[in-house]
Amino acid sequence: MAERAARYVIIGNGIAGSVAARRLREFDRACRVSLLTDEPYPLYNRVRLPHYLKGMISREEVFMRSAEEEKARGIDFLAETTVSAVHAQEKFVECADGRRLPFDRLLIATGGRPRRLSVPGAQGPGVFTYQYLDDVNAMRELLPNARRAMVVGGSLIGYELVAAFREWNLETTWLIRGPHFMHRQIDAEAGALVSRIAQRHGVKVIYGEEVAEMQRANGSVSEARTTGGRTISCDLVGVAVGLKKNIDFLQGSTIALNEGVLTDEHLVTSHPDVYAAGDVAEFNDLVVGQRSLLGTWHNASLQGELVAKNMLGAQLVFKAVPIYSNPLFDSRIKVIGITSQSDRSLESLVKNEPDQGRYLRLFFRGAQLVGAVIIGKIDYHLRVALMKYMLTGEHVPNKQHLIATQSHTV
């Protein structure tokens, strides 16, 4: 009697889930792979969404795969399929439409969804989050006729929205609750540098205030009132106030959860046949010595590659240094490793060169370098040294020397 083909179910069609699906089919041509997404689309490149939002590329150029390509590779691609529960012990996934999909091994790669404004008037046309293709499609429809925009949230996503709205030549106000941009990762001096870059490109920046309510005229957004008593005219609002991991469907299951899905360094969850990868995986990070959530496209792709091999029986360990890199109009910010946002006990050293538009902050746990924030360009040799120290865990013999003697490039 022939042995039954292995059944793999993957929840989430982002880069982690999609890469894992393809690798499973490449390494085991007899296996059955079901790839589920609650969106109507096959894989698209979220890294290219800012370019699409700015009008630099077409909608078609955002897509990386088609449903036909997935089928040709032997992947059962199930779009617009919402999972309502995972029954790990019984080994099946329950869908909202009543279908039950049995599995031998399951991958959870559901990523996160944007938090929304909950103030009066925020629900309805003109107020957008920024994570999915549908978000950008909806903004693109309004942008050609918009005049004034507001961005809420002092994050990297917030900066992407600000830059996109200015690309459309909108009068743009940026409302940030904290004392400055990314206030948990960078200090006031770096925050001032980021403000100057934004203001130089025509952005009005307001700190220490939140949206109290949105006003509408004929159903459309017309203005925002802040907790500081300001009134901001706007006909388009972008919201960037953080992400919530997509784990609601796992509540009440036997899968261990925290902010994300808890895994070991092999990306295995509390159930030996259930794995997690991508933004939703809260894994045992051997590089920095703590549990980590990595919200980058590159790391999600790497995890997709590794987890497919482990689902097939390997015992590979995921080790990588997370790197977030975003343009700041004519400058750039990089966040490498972990910062005081995830561990407030970290020691930090700063090199600030505001006249040159450059800033460097290094984060240490004892003598171990665990993170860095960089604004502007840095010397190649410094970049190599930082990555080496973080990836190997080698102690830095002289912290002051590391930050003082390495020079930035012009």
Image (cartoon, rainbow, N blue to C red):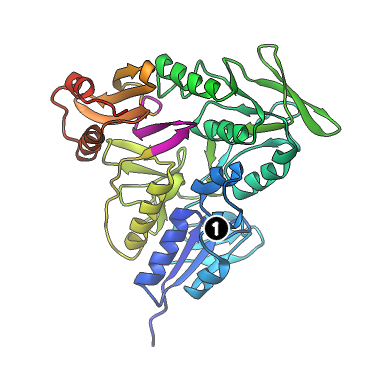
123 displayed left or right of 25: right
In front here: 275 or 191? 191
Residue type pointed to by label 1: Phe
Q: Identify the residue under disc 1.
A: 63
Q: Quadrant of residue 219?
A: top right
Q: Disc count in the image?
A: 1
408 displayed left or right of 112: left
Q: Quadrant of the C terminus?
A: top left
Q: Quadrant of the N terminus?
A: bottom left
Q: Please say if 199 is above or below 133.
A: above
Q: Quadrant of residue 77?
A: bottom right
Dominant SS in magenta: strand
Q: Please say if 191 is above or below 329.
A: above
Q: Is any atom of residue 137 visible in this view?
A: yes
Taking the spot 30% from the left edge, 30% from the top edge, the residue there is 378
Give the magenta-colored segment's residue range. Answer: 324-341
Residue 325 inside the magenta-drawn segment: yes
Image location of residue 135, percent across then percent down: 64, 44
> In the structure shown, which secondary structural element does the residue marked by tag 1 occupy?
loop
Taking the spot 26% from the left edge, 25% from the top edge, the residue there is 364
